[in-house]
Amino acid sequence: MDKAHSLMADKPGIRLDKFVSEKCPELSRTHAQRLIADGHITVNGQPAKPSLKLAMGDRVDIIIPPAPPSPLSPQALPLNIIYEDDDLLVVDKPAGLTVHPAPGHPDHTLVNAILAHCPHLAELGSSLRPGIVHRLDKDTSGLMLVAKNRAAQADLISQFRARSIVKAYLVLVRGQLTPERGIIEAAIGRDPRHRKRMAVVTEGREARTQYQVIRYVDDHTLLEVIPETGRTHQIRVHLAAIGYPVVGDPVYGVRSPHLSRQFLHACRLGFKLPSTGQYVEFTSELPADLARALEEIS
């Protein structure tokens, strides 16, 4: 059944799509724009554009049609849940698990496991990524946030856009990186010679990565790395670009006899709870394969 709202503009000059997403937390701004384009949102009974600036007292009528059924199937896969409340999950993802269905990985993904744990997420629509607000590469392990409702999803996405969420990774690179603390700033975009790879390119998108040396391990360096931006493969690309490739990374780094995947683990995740605004932080220890590789290299 459709959900209907009738609201009065109480802030002159605000864009229609922003007004709708603020007044209806279950709608992201992108979802609001889609509803406006489809004619489900009108202003004073008339169709409008998302960019329309509202006048005080304008009547905004909103109809939210039911979401189409999800094409995804729940699958009872192991799920290591670190924290859960009514709004979200913090999951410790193992290496080798793809986050959402994609070509070559139609099922047995983190999303399929989450749907088995939270069946109501299928009601969020036909998206192949219900609840997903960020991602980790298949062969990267560690902490991930998953939203359990639209309002929480919009809140967490807003925190990511504001760069207020802390995501820290443990990374082992080849070579002894100096100085022991630094920031890498270099734009990232598609590699013009290898379209399936990313690279530091002048016409790319802004990218910024902090790092801190934890310790030197023989001719390697164990780092804590915090990407301030969220570009594809950002950590791997930035570290390779400065001459310290990630151990075990077959694309940008160096293969290792000690590892079958890249030494990259999302070890710390901090954010504000959508329900209360309280800042919380969670940590994850190195998984067994990375801990073993570190011991063998030492």
Image: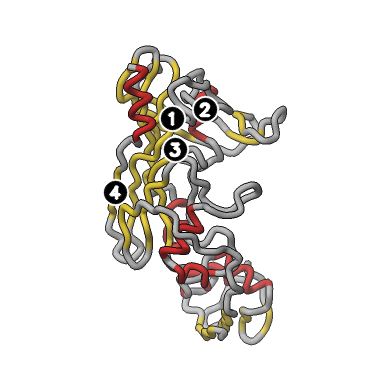
Compare residues 22 and 209 and report the one nearer the observer.
209
Q: Is residue 55 above or below residue 92?
A: below
> Alpha-carbon distance for marks 3 and 4?
16 Å
Q: Which mark is residue 227?
A: 3
How many neighbours does mark 3 have within 10 angstroms: few (below 14), some (14-19), or many (20 or more)? many
Give the CA distance from mark 2 to mark 3: 18 Å
Label 2 sits on residue: 249
Q: Looking at the image, is mark 2 or mark 4 earlier in the sequence?
A: 2
At which x and y percent is residue 139?
49, 38
- In-front residue for pair 259/3: 259
- Choose top left, top right, bottom left or bottom right for residue 232: top right
Label 2 packing within 10 angstroms: few (<14), some (14-19), many (20+): many
User: Mark 1 = which residue?
Assistant: 263
Query: 33 or 168, which is in the foreground?
Result: 168
Q: How far across and down, in percent of the image, does residue 55 sit?
A: 56, 77
Q: Position of residue 124 (x, y in %)?
A: 52, 69
Foreground label between 1 and 4? 1
Contact check, label 1 and label 2, Cβ < 8 Å: yes
From this view, report whether residue 117 is shown above or below residue 102. Answer: below
Judge depth for marks 3 and 4 and give the one in front: 4
Q: How is the image coloured?
A: secondary structure
Point 28% across, 52% down: residue: 280
Structural distance between the alpha carbons of marks 1 and 3 = 16 Å
Looking at the image, is 57 positioned above or below residue 25? below
First-in-chain label (3 vs 4) = 3
